[in-house]
Amino acid sequence: MKLQLAMDFCENLDKTSKILEEVAEYVDIIEMGTPLLMECGLPIVTQIKEKYPQHEVLADLKIMDAGQYEAGVAFAAGADIVTVMAATEDATIKAAVDCANAYEKAIMADLLAVKDLEARIERLEEMGVHYICLHTSKDLQRPGMSMDEHFGKIQKHIKSSKIALAGGITAESVDAYVRLEPEVIIVGEGIMTQGDRTAKAKLIREKMN
């Protein structure tokens, strides 16, 4: 089971590097989040991959069009995993998957905004998507939500792709997600906004182990 750190609102390379110095030893996948990529562009993927070659780096591009081109530039920049939106056209997803296979890298399909989850998951697996991310957006997260139960029901439909779980996961709630045994648990604010990021990352890692 891998821990993916979602680095969304880091603003620049210096801030990103400082945070990674605190938590990198507990993290397996370093996610360059969509807001961070909007701020810094793909060069930050290259810079972080060069500094942490032993880690996988994910570029959260949330691709909706031009699947081969957009995935290709991210892989060329050093990304090991690139995200596409599961709600987009099949042709876009398949092009991104073909590109990933050519680079011997991986595509993660994000299920945000998908309505018919069972049918879409089946199609994603037919297209060879490497990871499927069960994701609850920031805008939909609310106190009292039992997302682990929701994810558990969806997870049963995934047969061959690896599973990633994301959406408001913290050191306090991670146990429920660990019990679902996904390949990847994605944590953002549960580490990034904490007073002692190192302690939180270490605690999550220990619980996952």
Image (cartoon, helix red, strand yellow):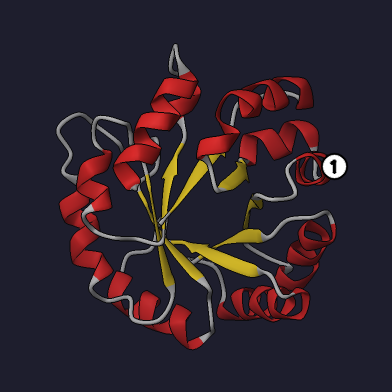
Rendered position, 124 above or below 113 = below
Toward the viewer: 172 or 36?
A: 172
Residue 178 shows up from this direction? yes
Rendered position, 34 above or below 86 = above
Q: Which residue is mark 1?
A: 43
Locate the N terminus and report the quarter of the image it occupies.
Answer: bottom left
Q: Quadrant of residue 113?
A: bottom left
Residue 190 shows up from this direction? no
Disc count in the image? 1
Toward the viewer: 194 or 209?
A: 209
Rendered position, 146 above or below 88 = above
In the drawing, does residue 93 fall left or right of residue 186?
A: right
Q: Farthest top residue?
A: 195
In percent of the image, x 64 and y 59: which residue is there?
Answer: 82
Q: Position of residue 159 (x, y in %)?
A: 33, 81
Q: Farthest bottom residue?
A: 126
Q: Secondary structure at mark 1?
A: helix
Label 1 CA crowd tier, 10 Å (few <14, some 14–19, many 20+)? some
Q: Amino acid at mark 1?
A: Pro
Q: Position of residue 114 (x, y in %)?
A: 38, 63
In percent of the image, x 61 and y 44: which residue is there?
Answer: 30
In percent of the image, x 44 and y 30: which residue is there?
Answer: 201
Q: Quadrant of residue 15?
A: top right
Q: Position of residue 11 (x, y in %)?
A: 70, 23
Q: Position of residue 77 (x, y in %)?
A: 83, 54
